[in-house]
Amino acid sequence: MGRAPCCDKANVKKGPWSPEEDAKLKEFIEKFGTGGNWIALPQKAGLKRCGKSCRLRWLNYLRPNIKHGEFSDEEDRIICTLYASIGSRWSIIAAQLPGRTDNDIKNYWNTKLKKKLIMGLNPSNLGKFSQPFSGSLQTQPQPLSTDLLQLYRDYNSLCFQAAKSASAAESFSGPQNFLHCNTSCSSSDGSCSQISYGKEQVIKQEDQMGCLHQGFNVEESQKFMLHYGQYVDGDHPHHHGDPISVFLDQRANGVLGSNSQYLEEVKQLISTGNGSNGNSFLFNDENKTDERGMYYYY
DNA sequence: AAGAATTTCAACCGCCGAAGG
DNA sequence: CCCTTCGGCGGTTGAAATTCT
């Protein structure tokens, strides 16, 4: 019954690949292909590696036409747009970026792009930019679409709906964070955005004004700062429970709409080339475009 | 210059659906 | 059906590199 075990874990090498191992694997696959069986491949190729490890090494590093190095602005926009639509479906996102691997994109998102996006959503940063920019993502801020504003509003709305009912709050991580957070926080530029938590909250005036200038009303701006502040404080790339990720994942997973709806959006995006329009990345959602604003990411 | 802190990213882990037996 | 393996995927880890103090 069944098949042979995947590999003998005790006799399998782990850790970084040596140039010799890389050469063996590359040579074998170029000569014989994978044979449709990764588990059997290492033995045939004379490698003391698990089949899964070989597959990963080939797909992420050795296979031809892999693109290494900086992501372009266009690639950034595609990743952000697709992430906003379908969440962390890295393999689907990678399929739209020739030469990029899902692992690469996942790392890039978790270490750089997400930060840029969230920095851009912080109203205290918005005031720093009086004019929209175009140009390199690394050196200049760029405008975000109003849809990201809408994403954040959806998120805040969910938080407050959920906060009204204990059972809802239990099933949604955002409100729990919101309700139970009791730490002080400061924005990344060192200015404190939030002075206290609990029922009495004080929001730094200029940050509120930043929100208001960007189309938030007073209540929204306060909600925004509360959520944003708790993420920025102690932010670390290994922490993936930040509000915007949780929210985007839940949205993509159907909390705010059916998954198929967003997959449809992706298909449309790809076919129409939307999301690569000038400096802002936009995706069509006729229900969520009642306002326009300009947001930035570093 | 040196130690601490932070960031990066290759690689591993574990789960899941599909399919073999 | 049920059990098992395989391939694929997303989440996570940790060593190395880089930046900060």
Image (cartoon, coloured by chain):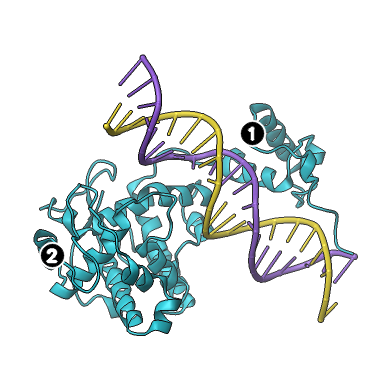
Chain colours: A cyan, B purple, C yellow
A28 relative to A123, above or below: above
For residue A272, which numbered disc appears in the image?
none
The count of marks equals 2
Q: Is residue C13 placed above or below C20 in the rendered structure?
A: below
Q: Of A239 and A100, which appears nearest the observer?
A: A239
Residue A169 visible in the current orientation: yes
Q: Is residue A282 left or right of residue A269?
A: left
Counting from the top left corner in percent of width and height, residue A168 is at: 41, 82
User: Label 1: chain?
Assistant: A
Image quadrant where residue A292 sits:
bottom left
The residue mark sitting in front, 1 or 2, is 2
- Identify the image quadrant of the N terminus of chain A: bottom right
Q: Is residue A24 left or right of residue A247?
A: right
Q: Position of residue A97 (x, y in %)?
A: 46, 52
The amino acid marked with disc number 2 is Gln
Query: x and y percent of residue C12 in the render?
Result: 53, 53
State yes or no: discs 1 and 2 in contact (Cβ < 8 Å).
no
Identify residue for label 1: A17
Q: Chain of mark 2?
A: A
Question: Residue at (47%, 56%) from the top-left corner?
Answer: A96
Q: Residue C9: x percent and y percent?
A: 57, 59
Q: Residue at x 29, y 54 (%)?
A: A232
Could you tell me which residue is drawn at 21 percent across and 77 percent down? A290
Residue, disc 2: A208
Please indicate, yes or no, whether residue A284 appears anywhere in the rendered image.
no
Taking B2 as reference, is A290 left or right?
left
The amino acid beneath tag 1 is Trp
Identify the secondary structure beneath mark 1: loop
The front one of A82 and C1 is C1
What is the distance, in whole Å, between disc 1 and disc 2 at their CAs?
51 Å
- Within 10 Å of the Cα at label 2, are there few (<14), some (14-19), or many (20+) other Cα atoms? many
